[in-house]
Image (cartoon, grey):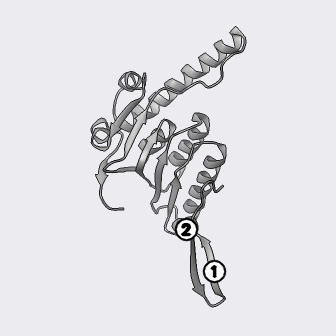
């Protein structure tokens, strides 16, 4: 699903000139973009791309560029599970901000790199529904606390920090510069060249 105006590429072939999306060209180089809100449509597209690339070469690295405000935790966890299940190593590169659910996807990479002025933001899962009966709100709250524990465990696994440290940091929006993200274990290194 294309949400933004993607530049096209024109190449000459024996049939004349062909125009195709720059994203198609990037996919041939095993590079994909997570540069939008995390939701059902964007996650399904990213999952299809990852599975396609794994089928093409199960051992070759896939690079995922991340510049996302985050979004749906449940949809993001589906993508996280696929990233963990494929045989290909996943290289994640933060090229702006990896916030909320996008920070979890970024931290889950096998090789996690950040550009110098990019940032990572982690926080507890958010609730957007208000209103309802007392029992409905209780159920929502219980599910939210379960999701909080799951996301904390995932970040703990990928950062080397304890779940308690993660839960303390995610109580509020915690922003990390590239240096701070490396120090906290959210990233491996800062890069200056892609």
- Image quarter where the C terminus lies is bottom left
Q: Which mark is residue 168?
A: none
With 92 as the anchor, is 192 left or right in this view? left
> Which residue corresponds to the image point at 48% horizontal and 56% vertical from the top-left?
88
Q: Residues within 10 Å of mark 1 (few under 14, many from 20)?
A: few
How far across and down, in percent of the image, does residue 99 sit? 46, 38
Whether residue 108 is visible to the viewer of this picture, yes or no, is no
How far across and down, in percent of the image, does residue 82 sit? 56, 47
Task: Give the residue at the far bottom of this rendering.
Answer: 14
Q: Are marks 1 and 2 in contact (CB under 8 Å)?
A: no
Q: Residues within 10 Å of mark 2 (few under 14, many from 20)?
A: few
Vertical side of 69 occupied by 165: above or below: above
With 173 as the anchor, is 133 left or right in this view? right
How far across and down, in percent of the image, does residue 143 sit? 61, 21
> Which residue corresponds to the image point at 56% horizontal and 67% vertical from the top-left?
7
> Which residue corresponds to the image point at 49% horizontal and 41% vertical from the top-left?
102
With 122 as the anchor, is 177 left or right in this view? left
| Helix, strand or loop under label 1 | strand
Task: Give the residue at the far top of this rendering.
Answer: 134
The residue identified by callout 1 is 18
- Image quarter where the N terminus lies is bottom right
Q: Residue 152 sits in which quadrant?
A: top left
Vertical side of 8 occupied by 72: above or below: above
| Helix, strand or loop under label 2 | helix
How far across and down, in percent of the image, does residue 20 sit? 62, 72
Task: Give the residue at the far front of this rendering.
Answer: 5
Whether residue 59 is visible to the viewer of this picture, yes or no, is yes
> Which residue corresponds to the image point at 57% horizontal and 37% vertical from the top-left?
71
Vertical side of 123 occupied by 194: above or below: below
The residue identified by callout 2 is 22
């Amino acid at each position: 699903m294309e949400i933004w105006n993607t530049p096209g590429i024109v190449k000459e072939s024996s049939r004349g000139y062909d125009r195709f999306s720059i994203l198609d060209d990037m996919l041939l180089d095993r590079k994909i973009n997570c540069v939008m809100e995390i939701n059902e449509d964007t996650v399904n597209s990213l999952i299809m791309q990852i599975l396609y690339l794994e089928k093409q070469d199960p051992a070759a690295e896939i690079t995922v560029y991340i510049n996302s405000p985050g979004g749906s935790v449940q949809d993001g966890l589906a993508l996280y599970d696929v990233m963990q299940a494929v045989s290909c190593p996943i290289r994640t590169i933060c090229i702006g901000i990896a916030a909320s659910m996008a920070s979890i996807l970024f931290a889950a990479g096998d090789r996690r790199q950040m550009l110098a002025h990019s940032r990572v933001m982690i926080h507890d899962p958010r609730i957007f529904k208000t209103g309802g009966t007392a029992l409905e709100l209780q159920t929502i709250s219980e599910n939210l606390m379960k999701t909080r524990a799951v996301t904390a465990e995932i970040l703990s696994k990928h950062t080397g920090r304890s779940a308690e440290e993660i839960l303390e940091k995610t109580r509020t929006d915690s922003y990390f510069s590239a240096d701070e993200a490396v120090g906290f274990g959210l990233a491996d290194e800062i890069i200056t060249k892609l």
